[in-house]
Image (cartoon, grey):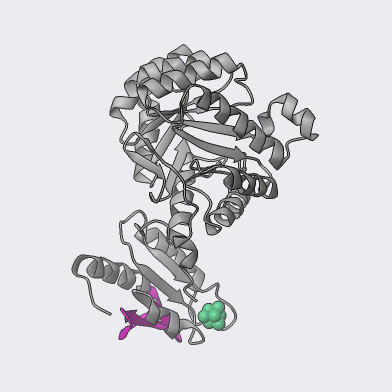
Amino acid sequence: MDVNEWKTERRTTRQISVGDVPVGGMAPVTVQSMTTTKTADVEGTLQQIYALAASGCDIVRCTCNELEAAEGLAQIVPRSPIPVIADIHHQYKMALAAMEAGVHGLRLNPGNIRKPEHIKAVASEARDRNLPIRIGVNAGSLDPKLYEKYGGATPEAMVESAQQEIAYFHDVDFDLIKISVKASSVPLMVEAYRQLADVTDYPLHLGVTEAGPPPAGLVKATAGIATLLMEGIGDTIRYSLTADPVEEAKAGRQLLEALGLRERKNVDLIACPSCGRAEVDVIEVANKAMEAFGERKLPLQVAVMGCVVNGPGEAREADLGIAAGNKRGHLFVKGRNIAVVPEDEMVDALVEWAEFINEHGIEA
Ligand code: SF4
């Protein structure tokens, strides 16, 4: 069986473009995040956007909650290295102001912009400007009528909320749509997205909302997003962490690389968890190696293994690896055992060889 078969069986979706970034169809799954600065603080917001872009974020969202935010967006958008989406709640006029400011897309919450004439006014303007809108359903801010009808924020209620919004959009011939049905409960969001995927072919934006601080937030977000991606569902993702948004972007990027959905940019460190058999301090060597590799763009697999049980096998399979023996380790480069390195020189040797392989390339 081809273990990567699921990747070619991704759900077929329509493609839209957020600025110059395609979402849906067979486009690569993209990473999104959201700034935490006041959008009126142009320089502060741009600094965060630059940091996000450098960490693997493809599309950024900024709140547009007041006129000053829309004015900020007018200055942020032309200087942003990645497309900017305005996040709109409650005030449909903020959506119109954000479009006037030049954003590349909108997120509307159907739970708190409910008047059909307001929704259609925004969709008509987006249609004329050829801008996409995400229908961002959230279990925590569902339309009270749907909440009552279904006795709570159920998957069915969330899907109906999205479908109602789609119908308003279709009334004005607008179809540059992507959709999210986020919840803080992983089983609820997974089921809502599954049901949504059955009834629409618009691209889906995945997320576990309010996942909380890492590490628990990372686990929750990964549980929900990865489950769906492995089922072929999902075109763009966001980790909603109570943390610096750069952590969200890094996590999103790492997940997509781990699943083979995006090309690797940084080192993929394979390290054993260590145990009583370990003959070097694997935890220290692995942590120091990760620190030394830092943000360097080295798309390589590097193994740090504590003893001969699995060490030689993993080190040989990786681009570069250490299989430890007694206070020293065998250094493998592209499958070849080329040297014996003392424990205190392992990290330097790994970094040097990683740079060398990256620059010169070595055939396995
Ligand atoms: Fe333990 Fe060796 Fe396995 Fe590492 S590779 S976990 S040291 S048995």
Asked whether residue 329 is drawn in magenta, I would say yes
Vertical placement of residue 82 versus 111, above or below: below
Closer to us: 187 or 11? 11
Quarter of the rendered structure image containing ligand 1: bottom right
The percent coordinates of residue 226 (x first, y second) are 55, 55
Vertical placement of residue 138 versus 30, above or below: above
Closer to us: 2 or 284? 2
At a point 34% along the width and 81% down the height, the residue shown is: 332
Residue 261 lies left or right of residue 191; in this view the side is left
Report the residue that reaches farthest toward the left: 360
Closer to us: 129 or 185? 129
At a point 60% along the width and 47% down the height, the residue shown is: 198
The percent coordinates of residue 246 (x first, y second) are 44, 42
Vertical placement of residue 153 versus 4, above or below: above
Is the stretch drawn in magenta largely helix, strand or loop?
A: strand
Q: Which residues are magenta?
A: 322-344
